[in-house]
Amino acid sequence: MTINIVAICGSVRPGNYTNMALELAVSELRSVPNVKVTTIQLAPLDLPLPGLPAKQPDAIAQFQLQVKEATGVLLASPEYHGGISSPMKLAIDNLGFPSMLAGKPVSILGVAAGTIGAVKSTEQLRAICAHVGAVPLPLAVSIAHVQQVFDESGRCTDPAAEKNIRRAATSLMDYINNAVCPKISLEAIMREQGDD
């Protein structure tokens, strides 16, 4: 069985640290057999504000379908002024009502330039995910002083931070393997028995 993971980067700045951290987590996911990862960059989607028509309705429909078909989701957001980035909030707002995130396990990764890291934004993102019916995993990853964690080429130079970032991926896979896949297998067995 293929496990489909969607990873969404909540920053649209060129060369952003959020994407550097997300790519590290994605590399961890891609090292797992039978895992397919789709990374979504938000800038090309030109997401509409709520209530306004989409300039690229086909792209928004594809985005929604990718999340709907995902086994799990990894959300990475920078912390801006004590909260999640507006592109990340806009992405969640464009996932429909009811949300395509509903019922999905969601791993949260936050990065910030400050000393306390992305504590406020990860908590805010957890609350938003829970509100739309997703299953936010309990241990969000928050990376402080992110500008000191990566070099100009995007390579992580801090082993402790790298371990934490990779944990955003491994905790998602642990949850899927221990809670989601057994449920799917049990449902398949029950359907088979119902056919007898």
Image (spheres, grey):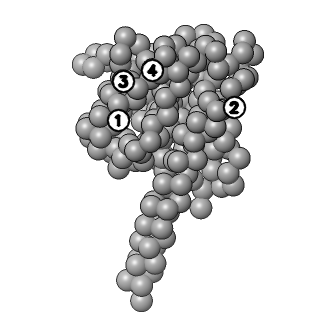
* Amino acid at pointer 4: Ile
The numbered dot on residue 120 is 3
Badge nearest the viewer, 4 or 3: 4
Q: Secondary structure under badge 3?
A: helix
Image quarter hosting the C terminus: bottom left
Amino acid at the residue labelled 3: Lys
- The alpha-carbon separation of the residues under discs 4 and 3 comes to 9 Å
Marker disc for residue 159: 2
Q: Are marks 4 and 3 in contact (CB under 8 Å)?
A: yes
Q: How far from the left and from the top, in percent, is residue 194? A: 37, 83
Give the class, few, some or many, for how many residues have Cα within 10 Å of label 3's Cα (few <14, many ≥20).
some
Tag 4 near tag 1, CB within 8 Å: no
Q: Which residue is mark 4?
A: 116
Mark 1 nearby-residue class (10 Å; few <14, some 14–19, many ≥20): many
Q: CA distance from mark 4 to mark 1?
A: 17 Å
Closer to the eye: label 1 or 3? 3
Q: Residues within 10 Å of mark 2 (few under 14, many from 20)?
A: few
Nearer to the camera, 69 or 113 = 113
Is 191 located above or below residue 77 in the figure? below
Q: For this rendering, which residue is in front, 126 or 32?
A: 126
Circle 4 SS class: loop
Question: In the image, which disc is placed on residue 126?
Answer: 1
